Image (cartoon, rainbow, N blue to C red):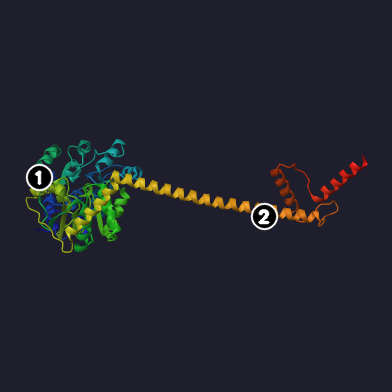
Amino acid sequence: MSGFENLGLSEKALAAVKRMGYDTPTPVQEQAIPLVLKGRDIIAAAQTGTGKTAAFCLPAMDKLGHAQKGEGPLMLVVTPTRELAQQIGEVADQMAVSTHHRITTVVGGLSYKPQIERLSRGTDVLIATPGRLIDLMDQAAVKLGNVKVLVLDEADRMLDMGFLPSVKKIVADTPKSRQTLLFSATIDKSIQDITGKMLRDPATVEIARKGDVASTIDHYIIRVQQSVKPELLKAVLQEKGFFRVIVFARTRSRADTACRRLRRAGYAVEAIHSDRSQNQRKRALDKFANGDVNIITATDVLARGIDVSDVDYVVNFDVPEQPEDYIHRIGRTGRAGSQGFAVTFVTPETESQLRDIEKLIKQKIPEMKLRDFDMAAAEAEAAEKSITAQAKRDPEVNRAKRELANKARKKAELAAERKNSREQEKRNKKNRQGGGQAQAQGKGQGQQKGQGKGKNARGKSNQPGYNQGNRGQQSQNRRKGQPSGDFRPGRARRAEVQRSRSRKSR
């Protein structure tokens, strides 16, 4: 293999190569760079992690001019995901240190205003996702009439994700005289048929044929019941290590669920999927790259958008729905010549998808055995948990629970009612006893007054309880049917004497 100095790059580009730490070109770089420098359109198929970005950035920017103030772009790179756009931008920035090009990246999930302001000042290289670029074109914030080089990165993925109408509109707005470079992990006949009209006499660079798996990746399967997957994932992490691992799930909710379970188990983990904001996804990738996070859970949307070096291994928590996605998933490890491995959890329901993958890659995937994981015990425990969970959801069980709860509530209410009744009865009894004592005290005071003790100047008793006794006497008289009045002994005696005198006087 020849060195970069033999590929036709200028001294500025070679300085960038040295700054980026490249020693020798990868096969796709070795074949693509001379073709790009000659101005040829190309279709390049290469395995993930083989340096496709540098294969088009180095030669295209090496021969690219500079736009006037307020003009541009001269080079347009369209890629399907925000993460890929940022990673391409990082490589372009390294190259721009030598070439002094202005690099602008526009992606969804961020404010329009800063992007529009940067475009208004002019740019040489524009890196964009299809959706955001179309929005800016509709706002007349960007014009593609000066594009000299058009790069469609991960072209098959863009078409799979439904970006074909957007890509056609973008291509139609660029000059027909442009140079078009189409890069992807795989290129099949359907992609060639769709993109054939976009390229002029393209040269083909085929480093990886459809279904090829990098030789640096060992891959395995573990057959497992769906309910045992969470425990199996923990067992794999314990036995194989839990540093720099990517776990792929089928849906966003499943990626989030796997993330939560691993966090509860004590692992440093972040989830990345399309529901996460741009800043959240960037922070997660930065933490993973810096070692602050050891595990990333992700979906297929980002299977090609995660470009982190030194990933130890990949876990396919769910079998991918598309066989091609299997290659892209496991291609996250074993990059740049380093060794890696991948393990896929296969349930009875996904056996047919496994067969499709094995048909695509034209090989049988061996099974992996874990030393310290008892599959039978895990299945039994999962079955017990499932029965318990089903019982909780059973309507008969729930009805019985409600009936028991109602009985317990009624029993508690009856007990409280009885307690209140007993307490009220005690209060009534105490009140009755207090009334009897007052009556007895009043009667005793009345007797004392009849003996002439305790009178004041008006003949009234100064003894405490006098009035109470009198009221008690009146009450007794009323109960006996006697007329009410003042029946104190002194007055009664005087009244009787007065009546006697009246009779004698007659």
What's the mark number on residue 437?
A: 2
**Label 1 – label 2 distance at C-alpha:** 120 Å
N-terminal-most mark, 1 or 2: 1
Q: Mark 1 — residue?
A: 203
Residue positioned 93% across, 41% down in the render: 505
Question: Is disc 2 placed on a helix, strand or loop?
Answer: helix
Residue positioned 11% across, 53% down in the render: 213
Q: Nearer the viewer, residue 224 or 144?
A: 224
**498 sits left or right of 103 in the view:** right
* Residue type highlighted by circle 2: Gln
Kindly indicate the quadrant of the structure image that contains residue 266: bottom left
What's the mark number on residue 164?
A: none
* Residue type highlighted by circle 1: Ala
Q: Nearer the viewer, residue 313 or 349?
A: 349
Query: In this orientation, does residue 209 appear?
Result: no
Question: Is disc 1 placed on a helix, strand or loop?
Answer: strand
